[in-house]
Amino acid sequence: MIVEGFAPVSSRSTVQDVVYRQLRHALMTGRFDPGQTLTISSLAESFGTSHMPVREALRRLAAENALEIAANGSARIPAVSLERLDDLCRARVALESLAADLAVSHISAAEIGQLKALILEHEIMARRGSVVEMLGKNQEFHFLLYKASRSDVLIQLIETLWLRFGPYMRTLTLHVEPILKSESGETFTTHHHEALVALKAGDSFALRQAIIADITATQDLLRELCRED
């Protein structure tokens, strides 16, 4: 089975890193179903590469706890559970609210403008019913904000959490698709607007609260979806 959306890799000097980065982004944005098996041969065909760079990328991702590797070398997307969801969200609240707090003192006017543009793009994608693109804009918003913290350590830790959160993003994607056909996409950017207002006012407390509310609102929704499953 060929996985759509991956760009062919041609440069041998960068092939391993490119395969790793593309797979990592796909996992982080919920491109794969919880419990789905990824075989080396199908991924190699998708990338147009040999098996080796795919195998190495899967090993690296397994080391980050984003995948589970079987004895035959194939990879499995972790299953979702309430316990793992709560554990991840607890860590996300701690680290992402800290990054947001630090961002208040360092963010530039240009970055605030970019955040505003991302909110608008997020809402446009929602009105179009483009769930994958909408969630992509959501991710861009969060990481642009967190990078304004100027803390490389925090960014690396947050990226790892989002990577492990991938199966839950996939669950969220499947749930949001029918909602966009009947509701306004602006309901998904409420906390982003609150964060932007707090940033402009230099209010670190309000910004932390907006980010925490954004994470916990998603957590509450996912808890219901996990129970239904």
Image (cartoon, rainbow, N blue to C red):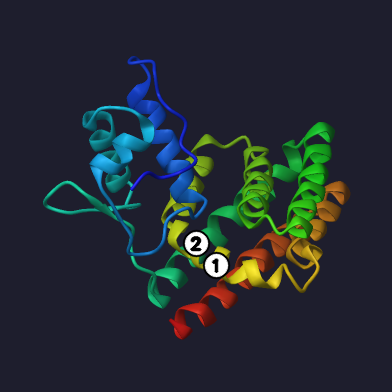
Residue 115 placement (x, y as % from top left): 77, 43
Question: Which of the numbered marks, if any, corresponds to residue 174?
Answer: 1
> Would residue 34 be found to the left or right of residue 168 on screen?
left
* Amino acid beneath label 2: Arg
- Residue 204, label in figure: none
Kindly identify the amino acid type of the residue bearing the numbered disc 1: Leu
Judging depth in this view, the residue of 210 and 10 nearest the camera is 10
Q: Residue furthest left?
A: 71
Q: Say whether residue 76 is left or right of residue 229.
A: left
Marker disc for residue 170: 2
Q: Residue at x 81, y 42 (%)?
A: 117
Task: Report how far apart the C-alphas of labels 2 and 1 lie in the structure.
Answer: 6 Å
Can you name the residue that lies furthest to the front here? 1
Between 177 and 166, the one lying in front of the other is 177
SS state under label 1: helix
> Tag 1: Cα neighbours inside 10 Å, few (<14), some, or many (≥20)?
some
Q: Quadrant of residue 50?
A: top left
Q: Residue furthest bottom?
A: 228
The percent coordinates of residue 24 (x first, y second) are: 42, 42
Task: Name which residue lies at 35% across and 29% down.
Answer: 48
Q: Is residue 112 above or below residue 224?
A: above
Q: Residue at x 84, y 38 (%)?
A: 113
Q: Decide: marks 2, 1 in contact (CB < 8 A)?
A: yes
